[in-house]
Amino acid sequence: MVLEHHERMNGSGYPNGLTGDNILLESRILSVAGVAESMASQCPYRPALGLDTALDEIEKNRGTLYDNAFADACLRLFREKGFKLEFASSNKPDTTPLVTKISLTYKTEIFIAQQ
């Protein structure tokens, strides 16, 4: 599952260039979640790009790079359901903050059915 999380729906990912349903369901979920988290986070080589930029990337490439169902679920959770990323702060300069939790403004349950 972790090995495939950089695979993309159109085969442009790595390490094996898998496409569509050949990518594990769990890997497709991790792919979308990983993009949201990594783009919103500060990295040692660049500042955080922000959650809005990450969500725009997911929306722009849904169905091409990212699974439609999981891209839509991610967009809905953040834009409509009040999900937020909260980052741990560090006293050390030039460190990457870790996502400590994804918080909800209200209680909700999300079910995604595999087709």
Image (cartoon, grey):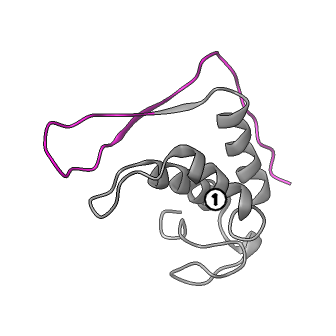
Residues in magenta, as a range: 86-115
The quarter of the picture where residue 64 lies is bottom right
Judged left or right of residue 108, residue 13 is left
Where's residue 85, x and y in %?
A: 48, 35
Q: In which quadrant is the C terminus drawn?
A: bottom right
Q: Is residue 98 magenta?
A: yes
Where's residue 71, x and y in %?
A: 71, 52
Q: Residue at x 60, y 18 (%)?
A: 105
Q: Is residue 21 magenta?
A: no
Q: Residue at x 69, y 35 (%)?
A: 79
Residue labelled with disc 1 = 57
Work out whether 38 lies above or below 3. Answer: above
* Residue found farthest to the right: 115
Looking at the rendered structure, the secondary structure element under dot 1 is: helix
Work out whether 7 lies above or below 45. Answer: below
Q: Residue at x 14, y 36 (%)?
A: 91
Q: Amino acid at mark 1?
A: Glu
Work out whether 12 lies above or below 3. Answer: below
Where's residue 12, x and y in %?
A: 63, 82
Where's residue 49, x and y in %?
A: 46, 53
Crowd around label 1: few <14 · some 14–19 · many ≥20 (10 Å): some
Near-viewer residue (69 or 45): 45
Judged left or right of residue 53, residue 70 is right
Near-viewer residue (11 or 92): 92
Q: Main structural element of the magenta stretch: helix, strand or loop?
A: loop
* Residue found farthest to the left: 92
